Image: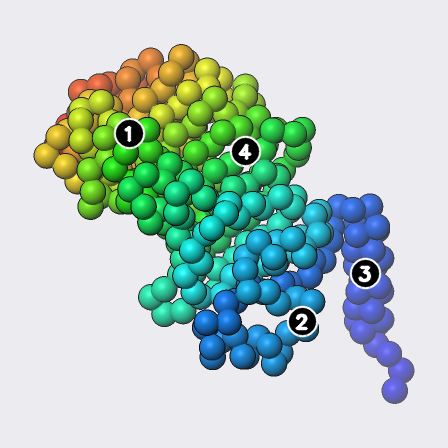
Amino acid sequence: MPATASSQAGRVAAMLETQQLGKLMGAGLLTVGEVFYAMPASETLAYNRIVADVAAARRFVTIQAAINAAQADRNDYVMVGQSTYTLAADVTVNKARLHLIGLATVGRLPLLSCTADFNLVVTKEGVELAGIDIAGSGTTNKYCLEINVSALAIGAMVVRDCTIRSGATSAGICEVRLVDFTAIPRVLFKNCILGQAGTAHPDNVVLQEAGAGGATALLIFEDCQFHHKAAAAGDQFVTLVTASGQCFFRRCLFNNNSSTAMTLGVVSIDARQAMFDNCAAFGCTGLVTTSKGLVAPGGIGNAVTAANVFNPALAVDGAATVAVDT
């Protein structure tokens, strides 16, 4: 049967699309990665299924071994099976454009149990972390997730659908530490739960940016929850150390589950600006000082004073403020 004009056009379009994809892949702009699995043998049922279905070169019993087998700049995936991984050393994500994805079961995420000072450390750009529970299991573990990308790099980093919490009670503790992301123009946290409100943390911050970033760096939190149990008024949810760059909070919740109210939820050193869009805060006198933060619903800039926080849901024109619930 002769081909119709529409079918011929469809074949031509498909051929052109294939050619274009080939050009992108040949130029290194588009890659199709391989999939690797991490699953401890102790998870007998799931492990046996992976052994039966996955080649030995692509399945491992530790997360680090699976990362080591992957290649950089290929968009490889490391699928982390549901289990508890007690860290005896840092798990280091040292492959650019690697995706570390948790395979969750009902009500459970894969758990990285951080002991002593062993943590999940990201040292390359373009990395995605998703669906993983990262928890400090001791009282002295300093960090659970550390981002330290100091080499020149191009590409955003994404952390999504993760729970990051520490049980530490020592001073100077935080769940996430941004050591250096000067080389990364964007770091996005999406739909994450950061911190925990069950144990008081002296001098603890949920997230601390320790000299990281640069003039063009953007640190973005969307639909995230920050939980804390302040031991003193000087504790805070977030500390921004770098003097340049910007930090955006969109639709975030800040919850201090303590009878001790924080003076400020977000502390910004020097002139770095923190911007809040449709956020809510509990248990702090204010989110950020006027000179260090803005709320901009509808493109209108509004200062967030130490005494109150602007609620864009109540006044789009920026005229009204509401006191923070303490």
Numbered mark located on residue 148 in the image: 4
Q: Residues within 10 Å of mark 2 (few under 14, many from 20)?
A: few
Q: Nearer the viewer, mark 4 or mark 3?
A: 4
Seen as rendered, the residue at the extreme left is 259
Q: Nearer the viewer, mark 1 or mark 4?
A: 1
Q: Residues within 10 Å of mark 4 (few under 14, many from 20)?
A: some
What's the distance in space between the residues labelled 1 and 4, CA to CA?
A: 22 Å
Residue 158 in sight: no
Is 111 in front, or is 161? 111
Q: Secondary structure at mark 3?
A: helix
Establish if 89 lies above or below 303.
below
Left-right relation of 326 to 202? left
Q: Residues within 10 Å of mark 1 (few under 14, many from 20)?
A: few
Residue 168 in sight: yes
Question: In the rendered image, which quarter contains the N terminus?
Answer: bottom right
Mark 1 or mark 2, earlier in chain: 2
Instruction: Give me the residue at 37% from left, 36% from top.
Output: 142
Instruction: Give me the residue at 67% from left, 57% from top.
Output: 69
Residue tagged 3: 18
Left-right relation of 146 to 316? right
The amino acid type of the residue labelled 1 equals: Ala
Establish if 313 lies above or below 209.
below
What's the distance in space between the residues labelled 4 and 3, CA to CA?
A: 38 Å
The amino acid type of the residue labelled 4 equals: Asn
Residue tagged 2: 56
What's the distance in space between the residues labelled 1 and 3, CA to CA?
A: 57 Å
Establish if 175 lies above or below 307.
below
Residue tagged 1: 171
Establish if 201 lies above or below 34.
above
The amino acid type of the residue labelled 3 equals: Thr
What's the distance in space between the residues labelled 1 and 2, CA to CA?
A: 44 Å
